[in-house]
Image (tube, coloured by chain):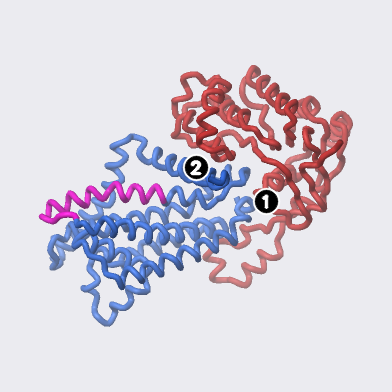
């Protein structure tokens, strides 16, 4: 193997490993805390919509979790990405290594964490008398790749631009929150009034989250949603990478 | 025979002052004004400088704060691009990082050696092979498996220097390092630097310590006001510099 490529891969492994070590520092407790966050959200939404507002949906807890867990990956990575180059200023100013590895390692760590939380989803499936489907074997890897592209592309974009516009961080936090409510996570896409339903196609993460949920709950994948998310994934990735490429040689100037 | 490994050819470097973009809010709401302010403000760090560093020599750079010394190191390391002119560098570069740079506080000394080594351009296999030698050189003993947040600044410096000491660079960039750590370790660092020198490594050394500059360097460049004031024998350049600063 080419030695430059080998070093590149080693960089990714060591940096991702480092992120994981920091996250799971206190081993099992670190894991519990990271799962506790989306579960707490699920509890809050359950009380608000099922108990108080009496939404008419079966297995609402399971429904929430199947959407919240992948969403958590997206929102964690994107929110963290804003400050990630600033946090690594000292090495970026002195060392000439591919800077995109820094957000990539962070995104991969969040992805691995998401994979670690899938057993929690399985437990909830059993609680509701359902079982994992064989289609997970190809469904999960496909959706993981699509989401990796979307999250990595968005993170590259946000992390690069935030160096030049330092208040972008705040705007991103607001946009991510808005996007959460515009994505069918706490409601299903069929509950959206028919005349507005086409709007979910304008949301790059909506078809993805819908696909995750349908794989987890019924083991099915809608080809149409899959194609749309793939197209979004590719465009977001190339846009993010383009912005990064254009700006990266100036990083050391701004820091 | 003089074989130049670093060549600066009429290099100028100026930075836009990015804070004039004034954040995304101002940028979006008063776009033209913000852009104009941005375009008209540049900070000139280096103006039309040319010099060469030859293979195997130790090249010192002195000058007052803000004169442009760190910009020169950044250009050599390739993290900055010149605005005008050309920078040519031949050979594998390693930089000595500032105290704690490229480390993570929550990781142990051993884990940080891996992290630092990878960032400095080694592969995992290479770091693993050198691990024991690095740990021994650092004299950190049992602390090596403690998170580095419990380290003193002297211990941090030792860890950082130990990693660099085990690299095999062709060009080594040093930005003020020998001032931390106890006398013993400082001496060890100095020995290691002389060792690098003996093995033919080209060293570019930025320092405010005229003692270290005179002791280590073969030639010295004095940067004043973003320009080269003088290049030559260490004794001569240093004594002129001291006279200039004190007058």
The residue shown at (61%, 36%) is B98
- Residue B242 picture quarter: top right
Instruction: Let me know if residue A130 is in the magenta part.
Output: yes
Instruction: Let me know if residue A251 is in the magenta part.
Output: no
The residue shown at (27%, 69%) is A222
The residue shown at (41%, 50%) is A108
Residue A151 is left or right of residue A101, and the answer is left
Residue A112 lies, with reference to residue B179, above or below; the image says: below
Q: Is residue A13 among what the camera can see?
A: yes
Q: Chain B colour?
A: red
Which of the labelled discs sits on residue A10, or is there none? Answer: 2
- Residue sitting at the far top: B184
Overall secondary structure of the magenta section: helix
Which of the labelled discs sits on residue B150, or is there none? Answer: none
- Residue sitting at the far left: A129
Q: Position of residue A51 (x, y in %)?
A: 13, 60
Residue B219 lies, with reference to residue A66, above or below; the image says: above
Residue annotated with mark 1:
B80
Chain holding disc 1: B
Q: Chain A colour?
A: blue
Number of callouts in the render? Answer: 2
Residue B197 is left or right of residue B157, and the answer is right
Residue B81 lies, with reference to residue B188, above or below; the image says: below
Q: Is residue B247 among what the camera can see?
A: no
Q: Position of residue B164 (x, y in %)?
A: 61, 31
Tell me the SS state at disc 2.
helix
- Residue A208 picture quarter: bottom left
């Amino acid at each position: 193997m080419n030695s430059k490529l080998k070093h590149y891969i080693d960089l990714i492994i060591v940096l991702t490993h480092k992120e994981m070590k920091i996250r799971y520092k206190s081993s099992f407790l670190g894991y519990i805390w990271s799962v506790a966050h989306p579960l707490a959200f699920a509890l809050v939404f359950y009380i608000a919509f099922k108990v108080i507002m009496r939404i008419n949906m079966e297995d609402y807890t399971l429904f929430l979790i199947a959407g919240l867990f992948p969403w958590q990956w997206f929102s964690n990575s994107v929110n963290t990405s804003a400050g990630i180059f600033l946090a690594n200023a000292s090495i970026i100013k002195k060392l000439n290594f591919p800077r995109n590895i820094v957000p990539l390692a962070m995104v991969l760590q969040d992805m691995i964490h998401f994979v670690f939380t899938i057993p929690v989803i399985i437990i909830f499936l059993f609680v509701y008398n359902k079982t994992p489907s064989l289609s997970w074997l190809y469904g999960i890897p496909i959706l993981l790749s699509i989401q990796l592209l979307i999250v990595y592309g968005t993170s590259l974009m946000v992390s690069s631009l935030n160096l030049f516009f330092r208040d972008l961080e705040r705007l991103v936090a607001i946009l991510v929150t808005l996007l959460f409510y515009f994505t069918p996570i706490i409601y299903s896409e069929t509950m959206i009034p028919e005349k507005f339903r086409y709007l979910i196609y304008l949301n790059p993460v909506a078809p993805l989250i819908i696909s995750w949920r349908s794989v987890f709950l019924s083991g099915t994948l809608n080809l149409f949603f899959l194609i749309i998310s793939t197209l979004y994934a590719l465009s977001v990735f190339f846009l993010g990478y383009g912005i990064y490429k254009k700006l990266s040689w100036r990083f050391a100037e701004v820091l | 025979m003089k074989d130049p490994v670093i060549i600066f050819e009429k290099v100028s470097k100026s930075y836009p002052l990015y804070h004039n973009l004034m954040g995304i809010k101002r940028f979006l709401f008063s776009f033209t004004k913000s852009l104009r302010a941005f375009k008209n403000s540049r900070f000139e760090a280096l103006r039309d400088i040319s010099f060469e560093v030859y293979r195997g020599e130790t090249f010192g750079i002195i000058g007052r704060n803000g004169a442009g010394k760190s910009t020169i190191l950044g250009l050599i390391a390739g993290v900055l691009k010149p605005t005008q002119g050309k920078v040519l560098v031949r050979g594998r570069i390693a930089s000595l990082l500032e105290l704690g740079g490229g480390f993570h506080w929550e990781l142990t000394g051993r884990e940080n050696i891996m992290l630092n080594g990878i960032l400095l351009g080694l592969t995992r296999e290479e770091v693993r092979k050198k691990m024991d030698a690095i740990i021994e050189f650092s004299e950190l003993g049992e602390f090596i498996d403690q998170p580095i947040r419990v380290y003193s600044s002297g211990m941090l410096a030792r860890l950082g220097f130990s990693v660099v000491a085990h690299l095999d660079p062709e060009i080594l960039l040093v930005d003020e390092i020998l001032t931390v750590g106890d006398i013993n370790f400082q001496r060890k660092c100095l020995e290691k630097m002389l060792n690098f020198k003996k093995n033919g490594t080209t060293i570019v050394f930025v320092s405010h310590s005229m003692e270290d500059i005179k002791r280590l360097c073969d030639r010295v460049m004095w940067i004043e006001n973003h320009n080269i004031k003088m290049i030559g024998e260490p004794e001569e350049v240093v004594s002129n510099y001291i006279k200039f600063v004190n007058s």
